[in-house]
Amino acid sequence: MSAFYRSRLAGLVVSAFVVAMMLVVSTAVHAKTKLTMYYPVAVGGPLTKIVDGMVADFMAKNPDIEVDAIYAGNYNDARIKALAALKSGQPAQLSVMFSIDLYELIEQDAIVAFDDIIQTDEERAWLKSFYPTLMENGVTGGKTWGIPFQRSTIVMYYNKDAFKAAGLDPEKAPATWDELIETGKKLTKGDGSQWGLMIPSTGYPYWMFGALTMQNDQVLMNSDGNETNFGAPATVEALQFWKDLGGKHKVMPQGTIEWGTLRQNFLEGKTAIMWHSTGNLTAVKKKASFDFGVAMLPANKRRGTPTGGGNFYIFKQTSPEERTAAMKLVKFMTSPEQSAKWSMQTGYMGISQAAYDTQELMEYVKGFPYAAVARDQLQFATAELATYQTGRIRKALDDAIQAALTGAKSPEDALGEAQSTADRLLKSYR
Amino acid sequence: MSRANMRHVYGWLLLMPAAILLVAFTHYPTIATIIDSFFSKGNPVRPSRFIGLDNYRLMTDDPIFWKVLANNMWFAIGTIPTSIALAIAMALMVNKALPGRSLVRMAYFTPTILPMIAVANIWLFFYTPDIGLIDQVAGLFGFSGHNWLGDPDTVLPAIIIMTIWKEAGFFMIFYLAALQQIPPELAEAARLEGASRWYYFRRVLFPLLMPTTLFVLINAVLNSFKLVDHLFVLTKGGPDNASNLLLYYIFESAFSYFDTTYAATLTVVLLGLLAFMALAQFFVLDRRVHYR
């Protein structure tokens, strides 16, 4: 070989090497999938830190994925931000959003069903690993669109000291509507310094109402999200009962009761019983200066509560690599260990039986049994009110509830009007 | 280029930054809003289409729209005269030589520097039944608690009182500045003539303050439509829309119902109302305010 060829060859080898190096570098850069995720926080407390910590753990375990987790305000804000990002062409790949945003997101053609992403049998099994009740708000038309993450139910918090002072058994919370009235009467003081019961009726009245109707064996909507049952006799009866608690039985203040200050009312002993989200459990536990109990909501025809809270959604405008990475993240965040940790730090419930079977959560529940009330109540739970046109329909029901509670309209008229509004809005979806 | 032309170019260049900002953030959105109000709400399945005045028909059939409009009127009537009267009274008081004058001035001005959201959070706990400040004070005198924000009859007055508390201090500053411009000779002359203090205020001081009153009035009217921050914290428009105001309803339509075109329709009404009132004040009242 002549010197000429040798030098050419050497040059070729060098340049091939350089190209190979560049390829390696570029694939290394390329292999790092970037994910943007929005998440909301609906109750007080340092929840952003907890989420950020979980995301950091995920990135440590998956160095090829970079997650940018963005706190996006409350549920409403998170939906607005995610949809705005979508429209601007710079969407997030996944988000935690209100479980009841499902139909709005489908209508906007924003999200992709998990059934269309999963490939292996293992993943199909994973989809079935959550509590079925928690999946109700994430499934429609036979497909799963949302994976439960920060989920709650309504529970009854009660002041054991007040129970003792009124001569009641502090270990026995009222289990039926009649017992609730009876207990409430004993706990209510004539001078207004202590009420028997408070059920909040601002902020999320439809959510509390979902509990009362379920206890009266009536659901508020169908699973296709295009029919509501606001005018049904059992629904009217439930609202009449809510109104009577204040008006007839005088165990609750009349008018509407503020969602935001209710916890304070309970902590200051102004009400002996409150109905509130389990998301408040850790805060009440830290701040209560008295002995308190947590119980399932009482029953009329049956026990009942709606579920609530946020689900994971994966957006449609994503590449296959991004979807795979997003699936990894969702699987990590909803794994039994993470769910157990999340539940202990916030009061939100574990989302699968496996989460409650972890060593940590089992021990925590042993020391603080009230952490499991929400889980035990799940067997009686139903989906939270979610339909197409969900904002307007929720508002129609909220207005009806408040009109009845403040005495502006009778429960029957108010709910009848809400039903005809809902019928008008949903006609085109049937 | 001639000298005159150069001056034109120079003038336009000076105007440019402000003009660009105005067009981009005021005029263009206004026109886009008006155009949007003639289209239907679209989604990827059913694209938006031209529907003429249908949105406006929907609006006149919407009982909540009339409710929020009436609420807004009561809110304006409730807040504007009282906060202006209070502002004048407070300004007259702190314009005098009294001990600790700057302290009192500061105290009157404090509500103004607080953000509305913070104010609403404070007042939420004032109004809370039984444990709130108002009910606790009332309790000392033997009154039983009242659910101020949960009763449709008291919720709007409760919000009006909070707004007056927030706004009066701000308007006071303008009156205070105006009062200090008025020469003291007028008061001395009036006293020599034997005019009573009320007569002096009615015939001399108040007419001299008219330009300030016009300015404050315009601001107060605009604020009564613009300020809705407190509703997010206090009532969310409830119970049953008893405290809902037009701008908050626009927000609900746009961001809770995602009905952006209906929100645009409501916005056109709001813009029309504000433009009408501003013009009326400038052209009708402006002719009468100056003391001649």
Image (cartoon, coloured by chain):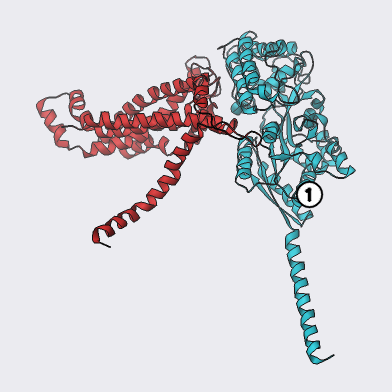
Chain colours: A cyan, B red
Name the amino acid, label 1. Answer: Thr
Which one is in front, B229 or B180? B229
Q: Residue furthest left?
A: B193
Q: Which picture quadrant has residue A342?
A: top right
Q: Residue furthest top?
A: A248
Query: Please, what secondary structure does the residue beneath circle 1 have?
Result: helix
Say if B5 sits above or below A296 in the image.
below
Q: Position of residue A398 (x, y in %)?
A: 61, 21
Q: Which residue is found at the position 25% from the left and 37% from the top?
A: B178
Q: How far across and how far down the image is residue A249, in percent?
A: 65, 9
User: Residue A261 placed where, x, y %?
Assistant: 59, 27
**The N terminus of chain B: image quadrant:** bottom left
* Residue A7 appears in view: yes
- Provide the residue designation for mark 1: A324
Please report the residue visible at 48 percent of the width from the left and 38 percent of the height from the top: B32
Left or right: where does residue A418 sit relative to residue A357?
A: left
Q: Residue at x 44, y 30 (%)?
A: B270
